[in-house]
Image: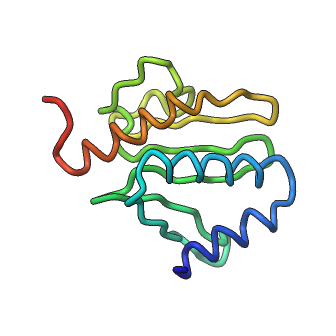
Amino acid sequence: MSEATEKIDARIKELGDWRGDMLSRIRGVIREADPEVVEEWKWAKSTSPGTPVWSHDGIICTGETYKEVVKMTFAKGASLPDPSGLFNSSLGGNTRRAIDIREDDEVDEEALKGLVRAAVDLNTGKAAK
């Protein structure tokens, strides 16, 4: 088990509420969508413990936790097809797109897997031109 995987496990446990449950669920969806995904822990500093990151030939997405939301930020989200309309945050940027998930939100796991796979395809050069 990698150090990053251990840190993500610890973060899920430390949260101890719906946010930890959601982060764990999202992680499972990402792993199902891309069994070759690499878990990383980035951007730790004195004011932040760091952020879970999932990569495959580049960043796919991050899993940030805030008081009211679990935020999945897709590094190249603006370039991804989102037929189910999952993106609901950071919509004005040229590159990133995010999904803010609140406590009572339902997550369309199949649509989320599709986004993850599209992000992997974009990173690996397999995306449709």
Q: Residue at the spot x=73%, y=41% of the render?
A: 69
Tell me residue 45's x, y (percent).
Answer: 59, 76
Tell me residue 29's x, y (percent).
Answer: 56, 45
Q: Residue at the spot x=55%, y=80% of the render?
A: 1
Q: Nearer the viewer, residue 90 or 61?
A: 61
> In the picture shown, does residue 120 fall above or below 56?
above
Q: In the shown orientation, is residue 20 left or right of residue 16?
A: left
Way the structure is coloured: rainbow
Q: Residue at the spot x=66%, y=72% of the render?
A: 49
Q: Residue at the spot x=42%, y=41% of the render?
A: 116
The residue at the far right in this view is 17
Q: In which quarter of the image is residue 4?
A: bottom right
The residue at the far left in this view is 129
Tell me residue 81's x, y (percent).
Answer: 34, 25
Number of numbered discs visible in the structure rendering: 0
Q: In the shown orientation, is residue 36 left or right of residue 46?
A: left
Tell me residue 56's x, y (percent).
Answer: 33, 58
Q: Quadrant of the C terminus?
A: top left
> In the picture shown, does residue 38 fall above or below 114?
below
> In the picture shown, does residue 83 fall above or below 66?
above
